[in-house]
């Protein structure tokens, strides 16, 4: 017999009761598989673009084009994606998008021209934009008796595991069967995600409040900035990412050219960062109170930046590994607390638009920073880029903590009727 959960964060949600307790595991597994498939596709499409391009300059542009086509839709379509997620029953939308992505991935396995590859990559990126917003909007609905901190920690862990294993799986699949085999595996991952969606007992149905006006594509950004705690968090994270993501091109150059650790070195460093993320999202973030979410997000931004900033002061590979574990803890803490802050301070019927906008803001900062990072490494060097990127990112987090300290004693209250599942 269908029942209804009456907490404010599950408005418009129906479920069949006990089955719902395993829905979070289903969503987490789907998110892990989605992240895994995204990186398999990225590796395969990047290698395929490299084969199809002509000159060495053409190779670089073609590979950059794959990244742009795959991730730019998350930014460019954020407003319309948010409207779609809040207007359509979310579980059904996730299933439909997964089926469409499977078809696109299958087409990518047999594509014969670079332009067709780029066009299909953009279609796949559009599906990623919709799926990510839908998955995040479903988290409060499937949390059950868990706190939102714990639910988001589980989701962040799943995402990190998918990101960690994806590049390796993509490389192995391409080595074993070529880029076509990797894209077929990616298509299969979308089929499994769709099947996982069908198994969910929960439904997040669109709701419209009596006082709500016409819905617009720019609503998501407006919702994020309507609450000053969320607005401060979004601003700090955006500014920090503008600098932090610029350090990504410097990681490989620093490990190989400055420290002289080739081949396996960068893999160890990235794994260390992932280990830190898992600890931050599972051990640290779950212990943060609802009232401390914003401050914890700022601390996460600060620690993440310091992990990169302090690394070049001592030219020892082991020290870099330790600092990247520390930075990863901050990264995991920031991801979980920032997402939970949005879940708790933005009304549930607005989550699709809010999270589509949130994904757009983050990806816009990261795409711009990646381009700038390549220039900085060439102009300043890898060591200097890590100092600059990590230091400025940490400063953004500390500035956010300063603003919060100024607000102490007159903190804004959550919106009326917006509660938190499983929290006191």
Image (cartoon, rainbow, N blue to C red):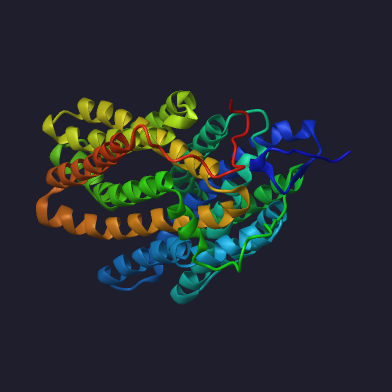
Extreme-front residue of the structure: 410
Which quarter shows the N terminus? top right
- Tell me the residue at 28%/56% (across/down): 369
Among the 4 quarters of the image, the one containing residue 263? top left
- Residue lying at the far right in this picture: please name it: 1
**Residue 196 occupies quadrant:** top right
Q: Which one is nearer the viewer's eye here, 304 or 321?
A: 304
Q: Position of residue 108 (x, y in %)?
A: 55, 65
- Please tell me whether residue 174 is drawn above or below residue 271 in the rendered image: below
Residue 340 % position (x, y)? 50, 39
Query: Does residue 71 lie above or below 36 as drawn?
Result: below
- Is residue 266 rendered to the left or right of residue 44? left
Provide residue 253's location: percent of width, then percent of height: 20, 46
Q: Residue at x 49, y 31 (%)?
A: 290
Whether residue 67 is visible to the viewer of this picture, yes or no, is yes
Total number of numbered discs in the rendering: 0
**Place of residue 38 in the rendered image (x, y in percent of width and height, measured from the top left):** 50, 52
Q: Quadrant of residue 252?
A: top left
Asked if residue 237 is positioned above or below residue 273 in the image, the reply reads: below
Residue at point 70%, 56% (across, down): 207
Decide: is 135 above or below 118: above
Of 401 and 394, nearer the camera is 401
Q: Do we see residue 267 in this rendering?
A: no
Give the camera-side residue of 279 and 173: 279
Q: Locate residue 233 relative to residue 290 in the image: left or right.
A: left
Identify the image quadrant of the C terminus: top right
Please give the name of the residue rendered at 19% of the width and 37% of the height, measured from the top-left corner: 309
């Amino acid at each position: 017999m269908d029942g209804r959960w009456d907490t404010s964060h599950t408005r418009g949600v129906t479920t069949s009761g006990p089955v719902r307790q395993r829905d979070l595991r289903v969503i987490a597994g789907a998110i892990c598989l989605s992240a895994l498939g995204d990186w398999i596709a990225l590796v395969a499409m990047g290698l395929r673009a490299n084969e199809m391009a002509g000159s060495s300059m053409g190779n670089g542009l073609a590979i950059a084009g794959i990244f742009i086509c795959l991730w730019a839709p998350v930014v460019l379509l954020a407003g319309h994606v948010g409207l779609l997620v809040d207007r359509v029953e979310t579980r059904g939308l996730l299933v439909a998008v997964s089926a469409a992505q499977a078809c696109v991935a299958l087409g990518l396995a047999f594509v014969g021209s670079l332009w067709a590859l780029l066009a299909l990559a953009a279609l796949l990126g559009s599906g990623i934009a919709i799926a990510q917003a839908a998955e995040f909007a479903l988290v409060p609905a499937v949390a059950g008796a868990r706190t939102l901190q714990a639910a988001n920690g589980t989701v962040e862990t799943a995402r990190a595991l998918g990101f960690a294993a994806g590049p390796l799986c993509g490389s192995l699949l391409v080595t074993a069967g070529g880029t076509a085999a990797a894209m077929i595996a990616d298509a299969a991952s979308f089929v499994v995600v769709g099947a996982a969606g069908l198994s969910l007992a929960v439904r997040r149905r669109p709701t419209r409040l009596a006082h709500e006006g016409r819905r617009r594509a720019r609503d998501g950004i407006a919702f994020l900035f309507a609450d000053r705690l969320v607005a401060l968090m979004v601003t700090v994270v955006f500014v920090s990412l503008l600098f932090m993501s610029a350090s990504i091109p410097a990681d490989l150059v620093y490990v190989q050219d400055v420290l002289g650790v080739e081949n396996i070195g960068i893999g160890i460093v990235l794994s260390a960062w992932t280990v830190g993320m898992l600890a931050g999202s599972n051990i640290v973030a779950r212990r943060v109170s609802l009232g401390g979410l914003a401050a914890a997000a700022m601390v996460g931004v600060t620690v993440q930046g310091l992990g990169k900033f302090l690394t070049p002061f001592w030219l020892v590979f082991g020290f870099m590994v330790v600092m990247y574990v520390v930075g990863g803890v901050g990264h995991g803490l920031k991801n979980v607390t920032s997402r939970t802050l949005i879940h708790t301070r933005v009304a549930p019927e607005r989550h699709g638009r809010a999270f589509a906008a949130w994904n757009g803001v983050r990806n816009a900062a990261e795409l711009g920073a990646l381009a700038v990072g390549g220039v900085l490494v060439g102009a300043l060097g890898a060591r200097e880029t890590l100092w600059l990127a990590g230091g400025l990112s940490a400063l953004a987090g500390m500035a956010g903590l300063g603003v919060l300290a100024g607000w102490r004693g007159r903190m804004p209250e959550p919106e009326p009727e917006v509660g938190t599942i499983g929290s006191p």
